[in-house]
Image (cartoon, rainbow, N blue to C red):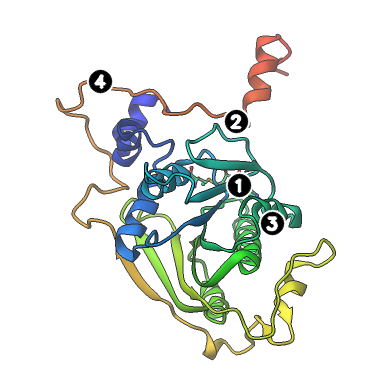
Amino acid sequence: MGKSSKDKRDLYYRRAKEEGWRARSAFKLLQLNDQFQLFNGVKRVVDLCAAPGSWSQVLSRELKAPENPEDVKIVSVDLQPMTPIDGVTTIQADITHPKTLQKILEIFGGEPADFVCSDGAPDVTGLHDLDEYIQAQLILSALQLTTCILKEGGTFVAKIFRGRDIDLLYSQLSYLFEKVICAKPRSSRGTSLEAFVVCLGYKPRPGWNPQLELTKSTEEFFKMPILYLDLPDPEERLIAKFVACGDLNDVDSDATYTLDANFKKMALDPVQMPTAPPYKKALEMKRRGELVRR
Ligand SMILES: C[S@@+](CC[C@H](N)C(=O)[O-])C[C@H]1O[C@@H](n2cnc3c(N)ncnc32)[C@H](O)[C@@H]1O
């Protein structure tokens, strides 16, 4: 798909380029914040699975006041390298690895985070059940790290896909947070199962001291005697409150729009070129004449 046709198809994609966001996902976080005031009083924030960095850009722009830039600490983590963002410490690391937590804690000087967000998505295989399973594991890893770093009363937001068993996740989260809401921002395509769990008021279980260890699997981590997250009875599963957010009269994120005279230029350049795209190796091989058709 060419640049201009995508600009045409998706107005959030085009708007992101016009406003300087690295990805259209920026609008999702902005709309979630408008609805839930996620950033109020936030000084330490962790952005998990952050590349190319539009959520980190939002965090930096919304939280970093010019008069107290040192007051706020934003740490962004991704497997991919990220081009630096003003006021953000970026770490290239796997969120499932315990050492990543140690690095974040070092940057925060041992202080807990007020807010952790995760827009993580694994590379899809096309095998629906497998993709759903891997996504669920990634959310659990994000949650695991969050329980080790979030302050009591803090907020956790994560991308989810509303598949068959999502109510189990809501139930599990409700063990750890006062309120669990499923939110669908206007900029998230209506045709996609994507949504976000907004978990307010972290309430670590009394006597539970969550710690990441290399030898413990995610399942073992959550199988604490007082926090056995696997609810056996489907009747007990929680149906989270569903909230649509963002201006519902705004453009349709699924629609194909025609560019009118208001758009002087057909195609806009990307705000940030990908630092390590998966096709990089193929391009290098092509340049060296090593890519041959068999
Ligand atoms: C949809 S993108 C995030 C977009 C980002 N929120 C933004 O606004 O630019 C999902 C990211 O999850 C990252 N990811 C997937 N698994 C990960 C893991 N185990 N550790 C760290 N990052 C991971 C991918 O590398 C990818 O960059």
Q: CA distance from mark 3 to mark 4?
A: 44 Å
Residue 40: x and y in percent read 37, 62
Q: If you read the primary sequence from the N terminus, does the residue marked by circle 3 or circle 1 appear first?
A: 1
Which secondary structure, mark 1? strand
Instruction: Quarter of the image for the C terminus: give it.
Output: top right
- Lateral position of residue 222 relative to residue 132, left or right: right
| Residue at (21% x, 50% y) in the render | 250
Q: Nearer the viewer, mark 2 or mark 3?
A: 3
Residue marked by disc 4: 265
Q: If you read the primary sequence from the N terminus, does the residue marked by circle 3 or circle 4 appear first?
A: 3
Q: Nearer the viewer, mark 3 or mark 1?
A: 3
**Are discs 2 and 1 less than 8 Å apart at CB?**
no
Q: Is mark 1 within 8 Å of ligand 1?
A: yes
Residue marked by disc 2: 277
- The part of the image, by quadrant, that contains residue 209 is bottom right
As shown in the figure, which amino acid type bears the numbered disc 4? Lys
Q: CA distance from mark 2 to mark 3?
A: 26 Å
Pick out the residue farthest to the left: 261
Q: CA distance from mark 3 to mark 1?
A: 10 Å
**Are discs 2 and 4 less than 8 Å apart at CB?**
no
**Are discs 3 and 1 less than 8 Å apart at CB?**
no
Residue marked by disc 1: 77
Residue marked by disc 3: 101
Q: If you read the primary sequence from the N terminus, does the residue marked by circle 2 or circle 3 appear first?
A: 3
Q: CA distance from mark 1 to mark 4?
A: 34 Å
Q: Can I make out residue 188 in this image? A: no
Q: If you read the primary sequence from the N terminus, does the residue marked by circle 1 or circle 4 appear first?
A: 1
Q: Can I make out residue 216 in this image? A: yes
**Are discs 3 and 4 less than 8 Å apart at CB?**
no
